[in-house]
Image: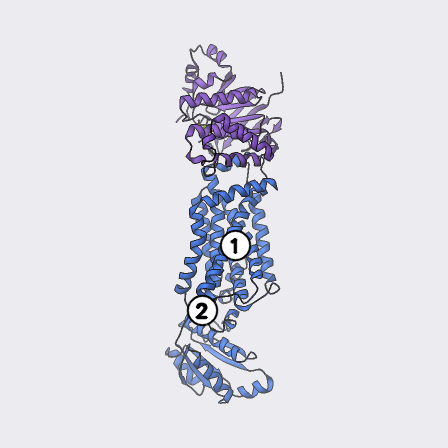
Amino acid sequence: MATPVIQTDKLTKRFGDFVATNEITFDVQPGEIFGFLGANGAGKTTAMRMLCGLSIPSAGQARVAGFDVYKQTEQIKRNIGYMSQKFSLYEDLTVLENINFFGGIYGLSNADIKTKSEALIGRLGLQGEAKKLVGSLPLGWKQKLSFSVGILHQPKIVFLDEPTGGVDPVTRRQFWNLIYEAAHEGITIFVTTHYMDEAEYCNRISIMVDGKIQALDTPQALKQKFNAASMDDVFYQLARGAKRSE
Amino acid sequence: MRTLRFLLQKEFKQIFRNRSILVMIVVMPVVQLILLPLAANYEVKNINLCVVDRDHSSTSQKLVGKIASSGYFKLTGNRATFKEAFPLMETDEADLILEIPAGFERNLVREDEQKIFVAVNAINGTKANLGGAYLASIIRDYNHDFRVQWIQPSAFNQNPVIDVSSSNWFNPLLNYRMFMVPGILAILVTMIGGFLSALNIVKEKEIGTIEQINVTPLRKHHFILGKLIPFWVLGNVVFTIGLVVSWIFYGIVPVGNLAVLYVFVGVYLLAVLGFGLLVSTFCDTQQQAMFIMYFFMMIFILMGGLFTSIDSMPGWAQMISRFNPVSYLITVMRMVVLKGSDLHDVRMHLGMVALFAVVLNGWAVLNYKKTS
Ligand SMILES: Nc1ncnc2c1ncn2[C@@H]1O[C@H](COP(=O)(O)OP(=O)(O)OP(=O)(O)O)[C@@H](O)[C@H]1O
Ligand SMILES: [Mg+2]
């Protein structure tokens, strides 16, 4: 087996007395689509931010793309893409300007930025919108754009925090097509979602309850293990006992 | 360097798309510079002056004549001695008593030096103090070799406390606007620069875009520079508009070199912007940043020497004003605009402000955390 691109060992984050992420341990293999599930408040975003080098863990160990989450946050940042739960491209810049800006920040050459933005706009069918302000786009398009910008610099891993929250079913399907394309190019996908049909698209999933990982396996194996007909059922059995769920 | 170019491009695009910023940097200086000097006009006329002329020479009479013809003073009689004049002050009939000692003309001619006594009525302090300042400038104008000694008959203050603000000497028309406008311009530049920079990073925190920035390998000092430079340019634009307005509306043309002003303001803006950026690295919401900036701006401005001369502040306040960048700008503005000071004259001020700039920006870079 290849070296995992994400390795965690008892990774923990506390906010005061509150343990948001509690000793989670797991590995993610290169090229995998890893589903990171859990009820609201389970600690998914918190865990993801630690893995992205945005937040220093309180305890435990983790390596992302081979780099340490305590000491090598800037190296990690060079090797990952991140799409936060809250839309965070610049709404007062156009589609092209956003692509340009983030391409530039990641140090892509001008020629690179040009070919990539053309390809990106073509793939998303945004030809008519390229010069429109991002704020004026519908949510589904924003999310697809945000994902595409997140992988512009061809990171090893991309972290997606509820990328399809509030997005219609057709666009969700398109979004997952984009994810598959990226995975096909060798980018490891680390994705959180509240949609169980999306969970089925993942190679493996973990389910977090109140800061802890309660189950981790392929969707198939989990259904068998919990004797459930669907992922919905598995999730329900596990998350039912959650105390944090709002 | 290339990264910085992308940051600047982005920042300028956002600024030019933001109507309110553009309105703020154009309309604010124009309106404030036209309104405030009118409202903040401290010019006082009809200051009651009692003259005790013990010299009775032509020189002393000429001096009194010059004072009387300045238009600011009303002579409320002559008295032979200070003792006789003093009751006038007690009954508030006189705001100032000017005593010209015997031998005034003689000493002036012989020793080229003579002291004059001015007593100030501390009850109506503003009027009397201003009157004192006017008087001093007239006397200095009359003869530069006069050394004026001030005494203030007040129980609280044994020592002479009135120090004539240097600007007045060089504002021979005693036009209060000449004095106020450069100061108000200084404050405008400070307010606009400070608030714009303080609110900007916080806004990115609020809308979440900073998260997307923080997850990139962008270097911290690039990020800060990317914020600093655009606001620096805006600050210079505001300053330039302000200079033009003061020229058109008040006919104020700096006596000193414009380049000196721009050099100083250039460095000063770095300090103020650094302060704004520092505040914004501490805050999470625009509201917090706003309150903190207001708090400091109030102190900076009220203690900056625009309305009250720093020299007449208590010692502790003078101490504080040494750490107040605004006071340096106001002083230098007046020095260069009214007095024609050059770079050499303002080198101490420039040094201090440069120090502020380095410390504040360095601190902002350190305090800006890409990883929390
Ligand atoms: N900076 C913080 N300070 C204090 N508590 C926090 C902080 N960030 C998150 N929390 C708390 O940690 C818990 C986990 O939050 P987190 O955002 O990781 O959950 P999540 O699994 O992403 O939930 P959701 O599905 O709603 O996005 C929540 O109870 C949240 O209130
Ligand atoms: Mg979350």
- Few, some or many residues within 10 Å of mark 1 (<14, 14–19, 20+): some
Tell which circle, 1 or 2, labels the residue nearer the N-terminal end. 2
Q: Which residue is disc 1 drawn over? A: B236
Question: Mark 1 or mark 2, which is nearer to you?
Answer: 1
Please state the horizontal and vertical placement of residue B116, each as a whole percent of the image: 51, 81
Q: Secondary structure at mark 1?
A: helix
Question: What amino acid type is highlighted by mark number 1?
Answer: Asn
Same-subunit check for callouts 1 and 2: yes
Residue B200 horizontal side relative to residue A74, left or right: left
Question: What amino acid type is highlighted by mark number 2?
Answer: Tyr
Residue B79's quadrant in the figure? bottom left
User: Is residue B178 something one can see in this rendering?
Assistant: yes
Chain A: give its colour.
Answer: purple
Residue B109's quadrant in the figure? bottom right
Q: Which residue is disc 2 drawn over? A: B176
Q: How is the image coloured?
A: by chain
Query: The numbered mark 1 sits on a residue in which chain?
Result: B
| Label 2 C-beta lies within 8 Å of the nearest ligand 1 atom | no
Query: The numbered mark 2 sits on a residue in which chain?
Result: B
Please state the horizontal and vertical placement of residue B62, each as a whole percent of the image: 48, 85
